[in-house]
């Protein structure tokens, strides 16, 4: 099935009390693995990549590979630019057929964030493409993760309501104590803040930094309005572990077989998150 706008997926999730998992995908075999599991479990999924993956293949190639693959699967999926860092990059993704774009100006002054997201909405909405913004700053756990800022600040509910009204974004990534990367100590999510955000903000909320979040916390966050959960570090780790195992005893291991071993682990991570988020079925 062709990609659908991410908004369609998130609105259904928000209305029915589950979340759609967004998986970092950087190569054809990883995209295929996510789509295959989504098809098997009859779950909506979001394929996403961005500046941290584009050194490998830029938006045009990523888009071409993803569009070629998605038609082979009976799965409902969106293709999303994650943490876009410029309007030029947003435009490149729109040309490449992404059905959702995030421009992350959360570390910039508020008015700059508002103006850039307003412009993104003006570019994307006429094409039927969803827009995600971020307010407050989701930090990163350590320096080995490439996304997110080093300093975090939590999202203010009143400011978030104003931000959504002024920009017209379809989804909002919030900072409630979550962080990108492998948690070295368990996150302390600010559920009171999330409840206040839910009351004030009319669009679905997004939780970045899914990897390592305890299932109980995740379920509570979903019950309080989180409709999309981003997962990257666990996907990358699964592939890395598969490769490491294959190459451990044999430095001449055949790369496609080593990748296949990684893909098997990636599929297990995808299955786990589809079940965690309640997206199965
Ligand atoms: P993790 O790497 O912590 O799963 O975070 C992913 C993410 O939020 C990508 O935007």
Image (tube, rainbow, N blue to C red):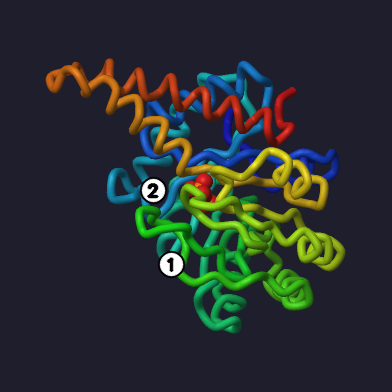
Say which element carries label 2. Answer: helix
From the top left corner, tell me how far across and down residue 183 is, in percent: 51, 50
Which mark, residue 59? 2
Residue at the image point whose x is 41% and y is 64% from the top = 88
Vertical arrangement, residue 74 with respect to residue 144, above or below: above
From the top left corner, tell me how far across and down residue 143 is, in percent: 36, 59
Mark 1 closeness class: few <14, some 14–19, many ≥20 residues within 10 Å: some
Vertical arrangement, residue 37 with respect to residue 110, above or below: above
Which mark, residue 214? none
Quadrant that contains the N terminus: top right
Q: Is residue 141 visible?
A: yes
Q: Residue furthest front?
A: 185
Identify residue for label 1: 86
Please name whichever residue, 39 or 88, is drawn nearer the observer in this view of the structure. Answer: 39
Say which element carries label 1. Answer: loop
- Closer to the chain start, of discs 2 and 1, is 2
Left/right placement of residue 47 relative to residue 164 reads left
Q: Residue furthest left?
A: 252
Vertical arrangement, residue 4 with respect to residue 152, above or below: above
Is label 2 within 8 A of ligand 1 (CB to nearest ligand atom)? no
Residue at the image point whose x is 58% and y is 46% from the top = 210
Please name whichever residue, 95 or 33, is drawn nearer the observer in this view of the structure. Answer: 33
Report, in whole angstroms, how far the alpha carbon at label 2 lies from the one at label 1: 13 Å
Residue at the image point whose x is 63% and y is 70% from the top = 135
Quadrant that contains the C terminus: top right
From the top left corner, tell me how far across and down residue 8 is, in percent: 72, 43
From the top left corner, tell me how far across and down residue 204 is, in percent: 75, 54
Mark 2 closeness class: few <14, some 14–19, many ≥20 residues within 10 Å: many
Left/right placement of residue 46 relative to residue 18 reads left
Left/right placement of residue 138 relative to residue 96 reads right
């Amino acid at each position: 099935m062709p990609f659908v706008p991410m908004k369609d997926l998130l609105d259904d999730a928000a209305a029915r009390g589950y979340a759609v998992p967004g998986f970092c995908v950087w190569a054809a075999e990883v995209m295929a693995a996510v789509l295959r599991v989504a098809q098997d479990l009859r779950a909506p999924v979001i394929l996403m990549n961005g500046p941290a993956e584009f050194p490998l293949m830029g938006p045009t190639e990523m888009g071409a590979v993803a569009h070629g693959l998605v038609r082979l699967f009976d799965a409902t999926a969106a293709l999303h630019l994650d943490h876009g860092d410029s309007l030029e990059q947003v435009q490149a993704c729109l040309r490449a057929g992404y059905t959702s774009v995030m421009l992350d100006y959360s570390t910039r002054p508020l008015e700059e964030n508002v103006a850039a997201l307003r412009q993104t909405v003006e570019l994307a909405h006429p094409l039927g493409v969803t827009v995600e913004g971020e307010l407050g700053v989701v930090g990163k756990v350590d320096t080995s993760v490439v996304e997110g800022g080093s300093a975090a600040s939590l999202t203010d509910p009143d400011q978030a309501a104003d931000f959504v009204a002024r920009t017209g974004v379809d989804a909002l990534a919030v900072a409630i104590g979550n962080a990108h990367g492998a948690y070295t100590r368990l996150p302390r999510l600010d559920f009171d803040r999330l409840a206040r955000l839910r009351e004030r903000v009319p669009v679905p909320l997004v939780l970045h930094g899914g990897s390592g979040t305890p299932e109980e916390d995740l379920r509570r966050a979903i019950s309080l309005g989180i409709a999309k959960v981003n997962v990257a570090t666990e996907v990358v780790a699964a592939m890395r572990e598969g490769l490491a195992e294959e190459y451990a005893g044999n430095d001449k291991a055949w790369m496609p077989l080593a990748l296949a071993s990684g893909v098997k682990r990636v599929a297990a991570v995808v299955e786990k998150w589809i079940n965690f988020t309640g997206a199965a079925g």
